[in-house]
Image (spheres, grey):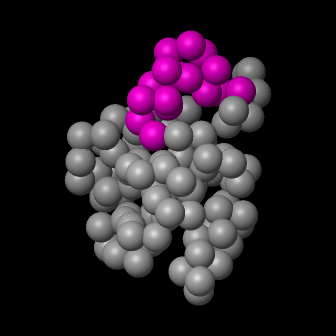
Amino acid sequence: MQIFNKIKKQINNNPIILYMKGDLENPQCGFSDKAAKIILFYKVKCTYVDVLKNSKIRISLPKYADWPTFPQLWVNGELIGGYDILYTLHTDNKLKNILNIKKK
């Protein structure tokens, strides 16, 4: 249960957090790469957790989230989803609202 508390704390303390394989500048899988590119497109402050370097999180987060795959984007404590959902929200012009991006 300690790891669930750590995950919960990460999610609650970071308005935008991406659990991914690799990091935003050097993703280590195709889906994490595509998700990172979408997040970088919006130029928002995003915390990431490299699940390849955090095996306890890699094993436990799917159980915590009831979401089996990575990447996972969380915004304001809510699971948004993986790459397919991010892509759909991005192309439907809805992700900017979820990320709370104001028009300039």
For the image, the number of numbered tags is 0
Q: Is residue 7 above or below residue 39?
A: below
Q: Main secondary structure of the magenta part?
A: helix
Q: Residue at x 40, y 42 (%)?
A: 36
Asked whether residue 92 is drawn in magenta, I would say yes
Q: Residue at x 71, y 54 (%)?
A: 77
Which residue appears farthest toward the bottom when viewing the image?
2
Which residue appears farthest toward the top when viewing the image?
92
Q: Residue at x 50, y 15 (%)?
A: 91
Q: Which residues are magenta?
A: 82-97
Q: Nearer the viewer, residue 36 or 44?
A: 36
Is any part of residue 6 visible from this angle? no
Is any part of residue 88 visible from this angle? yes
Horizontal and vertical percent for residue 94?
Answer: 64, 20
**Left or right: 66, with 102 as reference point:** left
**Left or right: 81, with 75 as reference point:** left
Q: Nearer the viewer, residue 26 or 97?
A: 97
Residue 96: image quadrant is: top right
Quadrant of the frame with the C terminus: top right
Asked whether residue 16 is drawn in magenta, I would say no
Q: Is residue 3 above or below residue 71?
A: below
Q: Residue at x 59, y 83 (%)?
A: 1
Horizontal and vertical percent for residue 65?
Answer: 56, 56
Residue 82: image quadrant is: top left
